[in-house]
Image (cartoon, rainbow, N blue to C red):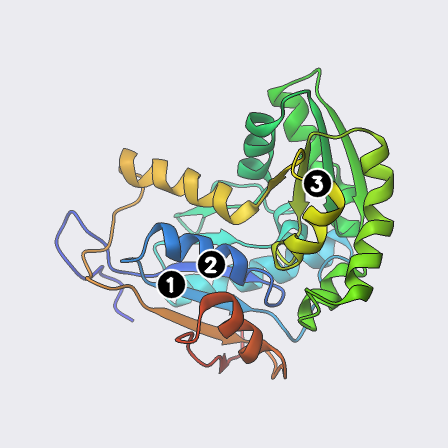
Amino acid sequence: MSSNPAGSSSSDNRPIGVFDSGLGGLTVLRALRDAFPTENFLYLGDTARLPYGSKSPETIRKYSEQNLHFLARNDVKAMVIACNSASTQMRDDSFDGKPLYNVIDPGAQAAVKASSRGRIGLMGTRATVNSGAYAEEIKKLKPDFQVFSQACPLLVPLAEEGWDADPVTNLIVYRYLQTLMQEQIDTLILGCTHYPLLAGSIQRVTGSSVALVDSGEAIAELMRNDFTSGRLKKSDSDNGTIRICITDASGPFEGLSRKILGGDAPAPELTNI
């Protein structure tokens, strides 16, 4: 790719780079594509090394930096860490001179805005929960708010298998959320980008009185502000494109990517980082 943005001086047609350990980040990509249909996107799923949520902070950061370098080499104009576990270790607002977005900060801001009684639940991987990143960010914004966390390690493989409507998934979600519901939460952060795929099962447990916070929608809102302020330049394309790369062949990836993004989702390309 050329290092010079295509288009006029007031536009930038280079893609927005998005990475996750697997396919969960496609829920963030979907939210960004829906919000910015003329933008181009490059998605990297590090399927060779998933899941990140059970790995050490040092390993997660090393993998994340390698993924970001891959996106930078492909001349993206901005980067999105569409992984909560990786976001806990990469909280900078830029990388290699490009705007960098994580899911923690906008997710925490959205939860505070949605909460009616200051009782926020968090479901996530062990790495995300153990980091305390969401609670720390929420306390900065609202010191009197309470955050109740629950690690849900079984949910990522269920989402990867496409078992979003399976009775087994409903039972496991219920088991995980029992403790949080006993705390009378009014808002629940879906602290893993796989979890929006299981939103139906989750909402059946929480009921409509609990607001669900989706990281993808929160990042889209933050990025919308940056397009308005000029931190990001819009593409002048009529229709945006999506390119998907993965680091290892994954049987269910292509089918689930089409389920998440629609039938016109491109086939994933196998790549090295």
Identify which amino acid the numbered label 1 is placed on.
Phe
Marks 2 and 3, the one that precedes in the sequence: 2
In the figure, 236 relative to 137: above or below?
below
Count all numbered tags in the image, as a single digit.
3
Q: Amino acid at mark 2?
A: Leu
Image quadrant in which you'd find residue 213: top right
In the image, which is nearer the foreground, mark 2 or mark 1? Answer: 2
Q: Residue at x 22, y 61 (%)?
A: 4
* CA separation in Å, label 2 and label 1: 8 Å
Q: How far is mark 2 from mark 3, CA to CA?
A: 26 Å
Residue in the foreground of this view, choosing between 75 and 134: 134
Q: In the drawing, does residue 221 fall left or right of residue 77?
A: right
Q: Are marks 2 and 1 in contact (CB under 8 Å)?
A: yes
Q: Which residue is mark 2?
A: 29
Query: Is 127 situated above or below 42?
Result: above
Q: Nearer the viewer, mark 2 or mark 3?
A: 3
Q: Which residue is mark 3?
A: 207
Residue positioned 69% across, 37% down in the render: 133
The mark nearer the N terminus, 3 or 1, is 1
Q: Are marks 2 and 3 in contact (CB under 8 Å)?
A: no
